[in-house]
Amino acid sequence: MNFSDFRRWSFAWLLVLGLLFAIRPSRAQENPYIVVYDHNLEEPGNLEIEYFSTVGTQRGGPNYHAYWMEFEYGVTAWWTSELYLSGQSTFDDSSVFTGVRWENRFRPFKHEHFINPVLYAEFENINGADKIMKEVEGHDVESDFLTPNEESRKEQKHELELKLILSTNYKGWNFAQNTIAAKNLINEPWEFGYALGASRPLALKASSHKCTFCRQNFIVGVEMYGGLGDRYSFGLRNTSHYLGSGVAWNLPQGWTIRVEPTFGLNGFSHQFLMRCGLSYEIPGFARKVEEVFTGRHE
Amino acid sequence: MKSRSLGGLLFLLTATGWPADGTKNWDYTELQKAPEKQKAKLNPMQNDPDASAAGAILFENHCEECHGANAEGTRKGPSLCVKEVRDATPGAIFWILTNGVVRKKMPVWSKLPEQQRWQLVSYIKSLSGVDSKK
């Protein structure tokens, strides 16, 4: 199966699952972040299927389109597990599958606090052609993406990534800060990164009638992220930094659309990234799977 | 081998998603654990005539999956039409919504703005069902 087939199948799966499970009305309450994580986890038993896309400009080489699918499952109210499949198409080059990621987020405290920590651990099995920029770490720079796919895909990376997510909800606002530490398990130094975000719904009160275009369905936000070097040269220099401003539109039936234009903040960054996402939340996924296999209904 | 893997996956999904026991006796003591200061909080939406209707829509979107369409309870979540909930102060219900009961699968709903959580409280306090499925 080549990669355009993979993308076609991914879309088909998303649509089929959407149709299959669109039984009960549900509305997600997703923030507009693409890179930043806040402390809100997936509700237990729910599955969220997400498709994200980043179109990036590239100086000195062809622009690219990177995309990934996420399958996010609420195992318990304090543990969310997520599987990613990613790929990219570089214009005038080729489309390649770039790898798999498996992440887990844990909420250590029972109750809500003013600042809420969440622990994040991810294993990545990706190749050097990966361009999704789910985070920036170490000395990631724009010129890393100049290597042709044929060559870059030969590099295999087995990476462990840890994050400390700190987040607060205050008067309708969410403020989140992520500290990132990543290590390629093949004898490379620890690399670091950061991500900061703030978001707020356009209206804090819910409407007393069902609506699609009500202000409370739109959450706007801003996020900033970049590298912090590695253990031998820690700091903000010689790495890339980005600032993006986006909106999430939470539609009926569990759909969410995200759009976020992002700008590079220094000469090491891509000048412009257009980032979009489409997600669908299946409430009670685990129950529905059980019903299919046991025939037992509520 | 394949069927064993599938069986394992199903076990993980079902065992962690909700209790298999349909006649579970739900524990409402978490309502009593709310700090006194939180219990004493008044609902700022109590005089808003639309609060309960807005809360009903929020309930349908976020709570119905576990608590049932009429809050009568399901295998996943307790009935809210019971004496314990009716007797609870609005502040105690708001505290539960804000903090969840994460060890017992009730998620934290602090991602909803405060106003929306109070609208949910208005709806939950308006429920007058009988003590069913407790």
Image (cartoon, coloured by chain):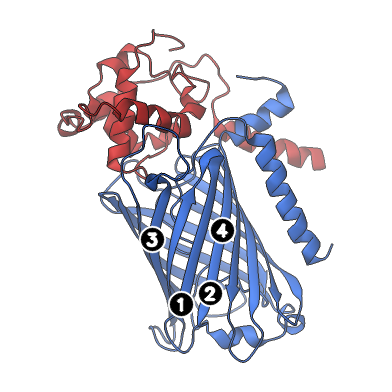
List the residue tagged with mark 2: A273
Return the disc, 3 or 4, that comes first in the chain's sequence: 3
What residue is drawn where x is 82% and y is 66%? A2
Disc on the earlier residue, 1 or 4: 1
Cα distance between the residues tagged 3 and 4: 14 Å
Q: Which chain is red?
A: B
Residue B26 location, quadrant = top left
Mark 1 residue type: Phe
Do discs 2 and 4 belong to a common subunit? Answer: yes
Q: Are marks 2 and 1 on the same chain?
A: yes
Q: Which mark is residue A221?
A: 3
Residue A292 visible in the picture: yes
Q: Position of residue A5 (x, y in %)?
A: 80, 61
Name the amino acid, label 2: Leu
Kindly check if marks 2 and 3 are in contact, taking CB atoms under 8 A apart as contact.
no
Tell which subunit mark 4 falls on: A
Residue that carries the numbered disc 1 in the rendered image: A263
Res A112 quadrant in image: top left
How far separated are the C-alphas under marks 2 and 1? 6 Å
Instruction: Identify the residue at image location x=55%, y=49%.
Output: A81
CA distance for labels 3 and 1: 15 Å
Under circle 2, the secondary element is strand
Instruction: Locate residue B82, reporting x and y percent.
Output: 36, 13
Q: Secondary structure at mark 1?
A: strand
**In the displayed structure image, the side of residue A169 where residue A274 appears, left or right:** right
* Residue A173 numbered mark, or none: none
* Chain letter for mark 2: A
